[in-house]
Amino acid sequence: MQNLVTVLLAVLMIIPVAMISIGVKFLEDCPLEPRVPVYLLVGGCVLLLKLILCLWRAMQRRRHDSVDVSYDEGDAEAGFSSRTYRFMNVVLTMFLVGWHVAGSYWLFSIWKPRFKPLLHDPSEWCERSVYLFSVGQNLGLYCLSCLYLAAVCCLALVYRPPDADIIH
């Protein structure tokens, strides 16, 4: 199972690398909403950092079997790294959620922009690649979030305690 998680994390790194690449390449090519390429660039960097952190944690767990077990046995360094990992994971996740909400606002406030600059109004356009990739990435994340919430709800219904049916 740990090998599957490691491979999945490695494959998922394609997404932030693509976000960073498109954000850098088209940084100046969306004057209608200049924060859209910045949304991709910053979001890609933070997501890549989070995935590297998760990959590092998965490899560390595989190497030491369990960091928390070694902490319980008195290894203060392992406990520190475990607490640091959890703190960084929470901070990065909260940032990514907030950044995703901000990016959604920036993207959908310019819904269906022109993809070529007009001669009389050269600042009212956004590069097709950056805009469509941003919308696809944004909507894909909303779909994954909905699937995750549905899975959590289904698991909560299936694995509820046996005495949950008793009304007090």
Image (spheres, grey):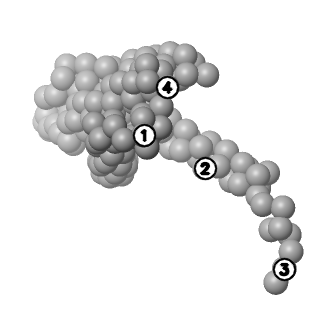
Mark 3 and mark 2: Cα distance apart in space:
27 Å
- The residue that label 4 is drawn on is 65
Could you tell me residue 14's position as x and y percent? 39, 18
Extreme residue toward the bottom, this view? 168
Residue 157 in sight in this render? yes
- Dot 4 or dot 2: first in sequence order is 4
Mark 1 and mark 4: Cα distance apart in space:
13 Å
> Is 26 situated left or right of 11 in this image?
left
User: Three-letter amino acid code at disc 1?
Assistant: Glu
- Dot 4 or dot 3: first in sequence order is 4
From the image, state whether disc 4 or disc 2 is nearer to you.
Answer: 4
User: Three-letter amino acid code at disc 4?
Assistant: Asp
Could you tell me residue 34's position as x and y percent? 17, 39
- Residue at 25% of width from left, 19% of height from top? 21
> Is 23 situated left or right of 103 in this image?
left
| Secondary structure state at the residue bearing disc 1 | loop
Mark 3 and mark 1: Cα distance apart in space:
42 Å
- Residue at 36% of width from left, 41% of height from top? 74
Task: Tell me the crowding category of disc 4: few under 14, some 14 to 19, or many 20 or more residues within 10 angstroms, Cα based.
Answer: few
- Residue at 42% of width from left, 35% of height from top? 70
Tag shown at residue 106:
none
- Reply above or below: 48 against 73: above
Task: Tell me the crowding category of disc 3: few under 14, some 14 to 19, or many 20 or more residues within 10 angstroms, Cα based.
Answer: few
- Dot 1 or dot 2: first in sequence order is 1
- The residue that label 3 is drawn on is 167
| Secondary structure state at the residue bearing disc 3 | loop
Tag shown at residue 149:
2
From the image, state whether disc 1 or disc 4 is nearer to you.
Answer: 1
Tag shown at residue 73:
1
- Reply above or below: 41 against 68: above
